[in-house]
Image: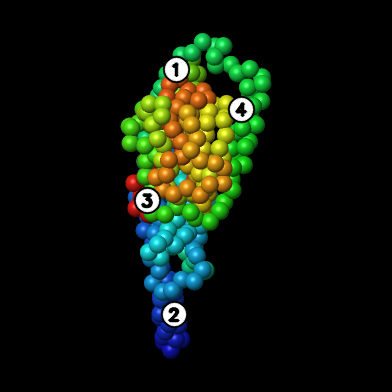
Amino acid sequence: MLAKFSYRFLLVVLLFLITLPLSFAFSFELKPKEVIPGDVFSIAVHANKDITALPIAEFDGIKIDFYRDINARLIALVPVDIETKPKKYPVSVHYGDDKETKYVTIKPHSFQTKKITLPEEKVILRPEDLKRAEKETELMNNTLSQVTDRLWDGRFTAPTDTGISEPFGTKRIMNGKRTSVHRGIDYKGKTGTPVNAVNAGIVVLKEDLFFGGNTVVLDHGMGLFSVYMHLSEFRVEKGDAISKGQIIGLVGMSGRATGPHLHFGLKLQGVSVNPLSLFKLEL
Ligand SMILES: [Zn+2]
């Protein structure tokens, strides 16, 4: 009886010792650990031994790829949709048969409300405009669904330093009805103010859109895109390779804009995210 027990005990100890180094092949860190809906957070993996293949992260049902930055750190950027319910969410990193889980807190946030009153005839679109807008939405969705290799280099910087006139997440109430959520940032700016690329990328769209007016979309790779709208002038062509800070166009009020400003948006894995949360990350 005693001998059998000791044998089992020894086996348990042995198994524990064998699995111990394997389960500590890596550790990871979430930055920041608390966010609000619409933010981006990062996962940095610290490997305790040489990792040959890349790990995979999982958050709220989506899988996220890692990349190696210039210092060979493994980083993943995670988008939190603005409609995400505030609570604690598990974030898992898988590597081979290994899995580690940590928690990110999505805090509740009350976004601003903006009431707009317009004559009804200005709210209702003509059938031909509606058709054009639908076609352009499809073009935009196709553009934003391409996934390429990472092109960005280091931190993201603001497209202009003129100040913000409307933040991300504002709920718009048009003639008493909730119409849309502002899924970008509006920057102030006179017509002709230069607009800078927030990071290195490729011009994947350069179009005059019904709502957005003169619009440029930059692909930064790995499902991350920056969108610049209402430009008065383009300074790039489709297919151009752009460096961080390069002028891509000038502020204007083309498309459906009531005055000159830059509408700037960021899409990550198809999710509109608050650019300010990405600018804060040390990449
Ligand atoms: Zn806007």
Which one is earlier in the sequence, the residue at label 4 or at label 2? 2
Which one is earlier in the sequence, the residue at label 3 or at label 1? 1
Residue situated in front as seen by the camera: 230 or 110: 230
Q: Is residue 177 visible?
A: yes
The residues tagged by marks 4 and 2 sit, at their Cα atoms, a distance apart of 61 Å
Closest to the camera, between mark 1 and mark 2, is 1
Which one is earlier in the sequence, the residue at label 1 or at label 2? 2
* Mark 1 residue element: strand
Disc 3: CA contacts within 10 A as few (<14), some (14-19) or many (>=20): some
* Amino acid found under the numbered disc labelled 2: Ile
Closest to the camera, between mark 3 and mark 1, is 3
* Amino acid found under the numbered disc labelled 3: Arg
The residues tagged by marks 1 and 2 sit, at their Cα atoms, a distance apart of 65 Å
Which one is earlier in the sequence, the residue at label 4 or at label 3? 4
The residues tagged by marks 1 and 4 sit, at their Cα atoms, a distance apart of 21 Å
Question: Label 4 belongs to which residue?
Answer: 133
Question: Label 3 belongs to which residue?
Answer: 155
Which one is earlier in the sequence, the residue at label 3 or at label 2? 2
Asked if ligand 1 lies within 8 A of label 4, the reply is no
150 to the left or right of 26: right
The residues tagged by marks 3 and 2 sit, at their Cα atoms, a distance apart of 41 Å
The residues tagged by marks 4 and 3 sit, at their Cα atoms, a distance apart of 34 Å
The residues tagged by marks 3 and 1 sit, at their Cα atoms, a distance apart of 36 Å
* Amino acid found under the numbered disc labelled 4: Ala
Question: Label 1 belongs to which residue?
Answer: 116
Question: Label 2 belongs to which residue?
Answer: 18
